[in-house]
Image (cartoon, helix red, strand yellow):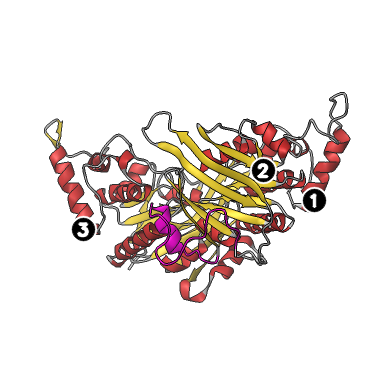
Amino acid sequence: MPPAVRMVDIVKRFPLVLANDHVDFELAWGEVHALIGENGAGKSTLMKILYGLQAPDAGRIEIDGHPVVMRSARDAIEAGIGMVHQHFMLVETLTVAENLVLGAEPRRGPVLDIGRARERARELIERFGFDLDPDARIDELPVGFQQQVEILKTLYRDARILVMDEPTAVLTPQETHRLFEFLQAYADEGHAVVFISHKLDEVMEICDRMSVMRDGAMIGTVERAATDTRRLANMMVGREVLLRVDKGVAEPGEVRLEAAGLHLRHPVKHKPILDGVDLTVRAGEVVGIAGIEGNGQTELVEVLTGLRTADEGVVRLDGRDVTADGARGRREAGVSHVPEDRNERGLVRDYTAAWNSVLGDHHRAPFSGRLGLLDLKAIDAHAERIIEEYDVRPRATSVLARSYSGGNAQKLILAREIERGPRVLIAAQPTRGVDIGAIEFIHQQVIAARDAGLAVLLVSADLNEVMSLSDRILVLHEGRVMGAMSAAEATTERLGLMMAGAAGADDAEATPVDAPAA
């Protein structure tokens, strides 16, 4: 039986980058096959070529043993390929049924046959065991249900090969489990799935085989029974990688950061963005904020760092009310901030590494003298030191920030924010879009900051990251703190239920929000 997909000797060049270097890839019918690698390894480019979004410079593609040329996504759809993107392609004001048939609408003469669209939606929902109402509007659905609609869109077009790009990034553990049940059943029917993910534990759970790419080349394909997460990580990076942080027991001290009764109204919708948020972070501990993205995490960080003013509530730093202070005032008081968008708020991309290394503190000694003139030698010496200590590459202070990879850009930001000697470190999505080797380093630095006595607030959409780094965990859902617990009490199941809106925990008492870790 020929494979579902065979890609042979695929080459794709961009200016200064060889994205795919004579890549071979094979997907069998009836399997869920992982395609993994660091950012920039070439896996997304390879799948865009398969889906007709980019044309290869060389190589050939076969679907079920037949040579094909993918000139567009329409060609891929006609060949039986469906792609579910990480960022959903749905029209929020339309219903499930309307989104399902968009672009391939059933008609009765010149008129859209909406009755047939609903009927077809119900047939697919029932066949694949999804829990959807064909008449529900997309903007009323949780993200897990929106993903089901994306999958149904491909099935409506008779996809036999499904490409899933980071499919669990916005799902609770329970939703992830339901997705895996569907993918396994779909493969068992004789279809095929390409599963792109950076979560190696999930790859090991759902995938039959794993193909690993590095620097544009295919490193190899391994069977699940013949590998583990450590070996996969080593293949991705080319060296030994520590996947879980080795940390000692926290020794929390005095309260450094406190928020009480934070409320923030939505400018359009009749519901709050923040709804009475209380939290404390003590010296020498990491407090993690878990939750599905879009539940108030971004706004909470902005309120705590002075980038946004809450409608109600108080923010205190070392017991002092800083609610009226802006971002500069909070920074002067000892708050450092690793922003979730490093390009928009973390770096000035057209500045050098040296200039970026002192952003926000450039007006202070030793970088600025009494007359307000910058001391360029002091700035350059500072940049040289932290670039070396934090392994930022290339090791040159004159490099423009736009030239950095995601991992090196993030290491420069983290170095700047830690080395300024803060009392509180707020790290938002610190490893988003970062290579696995850089993730290892960043995690080590966060724990080192905790052990040096900083109060660390970690906000991350990666539940594994929150559980690995945190001493206490708070769960945010629709702007409310659903509960808090020590890291020792936390399980993915308990956190997942709270992320979905269940208050507290079913099987144990939650730790009070302001209590130190056990």
Neighbours of disc 2 within 10 Å: few (<14), some (14-19), many (20+): few
Foreground of the two, 468 or 101: 468
Distance from the alpha carbon under mark 3 to that under mark 2: 58 Å
Q: Is residue 172 visible?
A: no
Going by the numbered disc 3, the residue's amino acid type is Arg
Neighbours of disc 3 within 10 Å: few (<14), some (14-19), many (20+): few
Residue lying furthest top in this view? 371
Q: Is residue 398 visible?
A: yes
User: Residue 127: which numbered mark, if any?
Assistant: 3
- Labels 1 and 3: the sequence-earlier one: 3
Residue drawn at (52%, 73%), measured in percent from left and top?
Answer: 227
- Whether tag 1 and tag 3 are in contact, CB under 8 A, the answer is no
To which residue does mark 1 refer? 388
| Magenta stretch bounds | 488-517
Going by the numbered disc 1, the residue's amino acid type is Glu
To which residue does mark 2 refer? 319
Quadrant placement of the N terminus: bottom left
Q: Give the secondary structure at mark 1.
A: helix
Q: Residue 510 location, x and y as percent?
A: 48, 60
Q: How many marks?
A: 3
Q: Is residue 285 magenta?
A: no
**Is residue 76 positioned above or below 509 on the image?**
above
